[in-house]
């Protein structure tokens, strides 16, 4: 099976298994999604979704976040881990949105990467989910792990995996592909005990082939 056949099969199987491809993080506003993604670093989306309702209620506007006391924000986000860095980045990024970007999350990779706490993973998610930009590839741990198993990428470096996937994924499909891979990683291809016998991707999985 060549790589184009493998990609095509994986994309179709994921679409059938997960017809909807929503972002797991809950947010109503562009900057809220930026904040939620920052909090999700080395933290589960489920935990972030438990924390953000109270956080967004306490700071209901971008201006409120920009003027927030960092130590108070720390209290709200403490359970997400690395809370001091995350609280500082949230406040500074919101200040920068107001001072440099007219109060909206920018729509280019270059500008997004200037925001405190925003790396390529966050930037790609924002470009794909907020602006529907084609070619957005969100390389989180699920994506890297499963794409290595499937034979779609090699290595653990997020930037290298992102570029490998950009070369083989149809740009229109890439953002939804990443969301579906996360869903699959939680439900079936679990890191510690993958359910290969139940996996809809098994016919296209290099790791499964090698272990038969």
Image: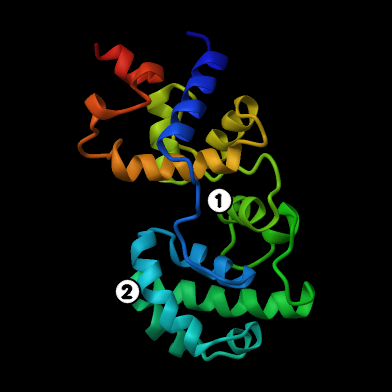
Q: In terms of depth relative to the viewer, which is nearer, 129 or 155?
A: 129
Left or right: residue 102 compared with residue 41: right
**Residue 117 x %, y %:** 56, 65
Q: Vertical placement of 88 versus 58: above or below?
A: above
Q: In terms of depth relative to the viewer, which is nearer, 146 or 170?
A: 170
Residue 84 picture quarter: bottom left
- Tell me which numbered mark, 1 or 2, is placed earlier along the sequence: 2
Neighbor class of circle 2 (other Cα within 10 Å; few <14, some 14-19, many 20+) is: some
Q: Vertical placement of 134 versus 49: above or below?
A: above
Neighbor class of circle 1 (other Cα within 10 Å; few <14, some 14-19, many 20+) is: some
Q: In terms of depth relative to the viewer, which is nearer, 158 or 145?
A: 145
Q: Which mark is residue 79?
A: 2
x 57%, y 31%: residue: 165
Left or right: residue 137 compared with residue 12: right
Q: Vertical placement of 35 versus 183: above or below?
A: below
**Residue 52 x %, y %:** 44, 75
Left or right: residue 87 compared with residue 34: left
x 37%, y 39%: residue: 184
Q: Which mark is residue 121?
A: 1
x 53%, y 34%: residue: 161
Quadrant where the C terminus lies?
top left
Count of labels in the image: 2
Is residue 43 in view? no
Left or right: residue 127 compared with residue 196: right
The residue tagged with tag 1: helix, strand or loop? Answer: helix
Coloured how? rainbow
Q: Vertical placement of 203 versus 188: above or below?
A: above
Q: Which mark is residue 26?
A: none
**Residue 110 x %, y %:** 74, 54
The residue tagged with tag 2: helix, strand or loop? Answer: helix
């Amino acid at each position: 099976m060549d790589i184009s056949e493998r990609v095509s099969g994986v994309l179709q199987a994921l679409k059938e298994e997960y017809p909807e491809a929503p972002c797991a993080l809950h947010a109503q506003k562009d900057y809220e999604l930026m904040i939620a993604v920052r909090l999700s670093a080395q933290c589960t989306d489920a935990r972030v979704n438990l924390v953000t309702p109270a956080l967004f209620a306490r700071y209901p506007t971008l201006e409120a976040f920009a003027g927030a006391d960092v130590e108070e924000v720390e209290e709200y986000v403490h359970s997400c881990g690395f809370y001091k860095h995350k609280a500082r980045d949230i406040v500074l990024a919101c200040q920068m949105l107001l001072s440099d970007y007219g109060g909206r999350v920018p729509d280019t990779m270059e500008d997004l990467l200037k925001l405190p706490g925003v790396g390529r993973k966050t930037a790609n998610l924002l470009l794909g989910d907020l602006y529907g930009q084609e070619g957005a590839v969100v390389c989180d741990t699920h994506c890297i792990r499963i794409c290595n198993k499937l034979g779609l990428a090699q290595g653990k470096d997020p930037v290298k995996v992102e570029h490998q996937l950009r070369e083989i994924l149809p740009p229109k499909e890439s953002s939804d592909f990443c969301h579906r891979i996360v869903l699959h990683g939680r439900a079936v291809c679990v890191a510690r005990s993958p359910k290969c016998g139940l996996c809809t991707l098994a016919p296209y999985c290099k790791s499964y082939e090698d272990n038969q």
